[in-house]
Image (cartoon, grey):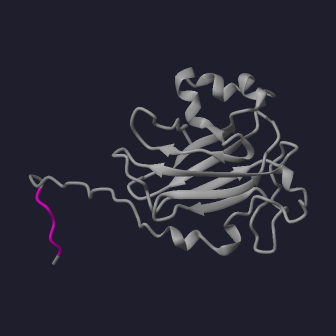
Amino acid sequence: MHNVASPSTRLVPTASQTVGPFFSIGLCSGSLGHLVPAEIADGSKVVSIRGRIWDGDGQAVPDAVLEIWRADDRGEYADSDECDAGGVPSGFARIPTSELGEFEFATLKPGPTAGAKGEVHAPHITVLIFMRGLLRHLVTRIYFAQDAANAQDPVLRAVPEGRRETLLATQIAGNESELRWDVHLQGDTETVFFEA
């Protein structure tokens, strides 16, 4: 015999929940820091980006993952056949934060990319952020603060001027190859996030 709720019984939906954090499942060694192709011998083309993810209470987030997608120096994204021996596409990486919420990765600076309507986007890196408490990942971009092309980038121009700096990686001690970019999930300095 089945128990059936009477018509007067009100059914309440099950609350939604986040899964995990089980991010280590997607973190194989082949996906970490895969942003500088082996054939690049010229270290002057490589930049190091480091930063930290902060929550709305100003606490570091120790269990987040940054998924990185970047074009090559010609502004082209890898084709499906441009993968390493582990099947990881060129220009893709997953980087976990440390116990202090810190992350760091080395990459080639990408070239300008063409948009869907033929507009030119300044060199940038697309970043997806996964972490506990999020039902959906966050999407943002890293731009290079010293790049003159930023002034004409259609995405940056759509962002209110006072918030654009949250998308800019800035030089550390004037070193062009060492950059800092922090992520603030909420608050006065909240990073700009985009609709996925």
Name the dominant secondary structure of the magenta segment.
loop
Q: Residue at x 45, y 61 (%)?
A: 62
Residue 87 sits in which quadrant?
A: bottom right
Residue 156 sits in which quadrant?
A: top right
Q: Position of residue 7 (x, y in %)?
A: 12, 54
Q: Image quadrant for the C terminus?
A: top right
The total number of labels drawn is 0
- Using the image, determine if residue 66 lies above or below residue 148: below
Q: Residue at x 61, y 48 (%)?
A: 127
Q: Position of residue 128 (x, y in %)?
A: 58, 50
Q: Does 102 lie within the magenta span? A: no
Which of 108 and 81 lies nearest the eye of the viewer?
108
Q: Image quadrant for the N terminus?
A: bottom left
- Using the image, determine if residue 37 lies above or below residue 182: below
Q: Is residue 138 left or right of residue 174?
A: left
Identify the residue at the far bottom of this view: 1
- Using the image, determine if residue 32 lies above or below residue 179: below
Which of 19 and 70 lies nearest the eye of the viewer?
70
Q: Is residue 190 left or right of residue 37?
A: left
Q: Residue at x 48, y 58 (%)?
A: 101
Q: Position of residue 11 (x, y in %)?
A: 18, 55
Which of 120 and 160 lies nearest the eye of the viewer?
160
Q: Is residue 14 left or right of residue 85?
A: left
Q: Position of residue 96 (x, y in %)?
A: 55, 63
Q: Is residue 26 left or right of residue 89?
A: left
The residues colored magenta run 2-6
Q: Residue at x 60, y 36 (%)?
A: 167
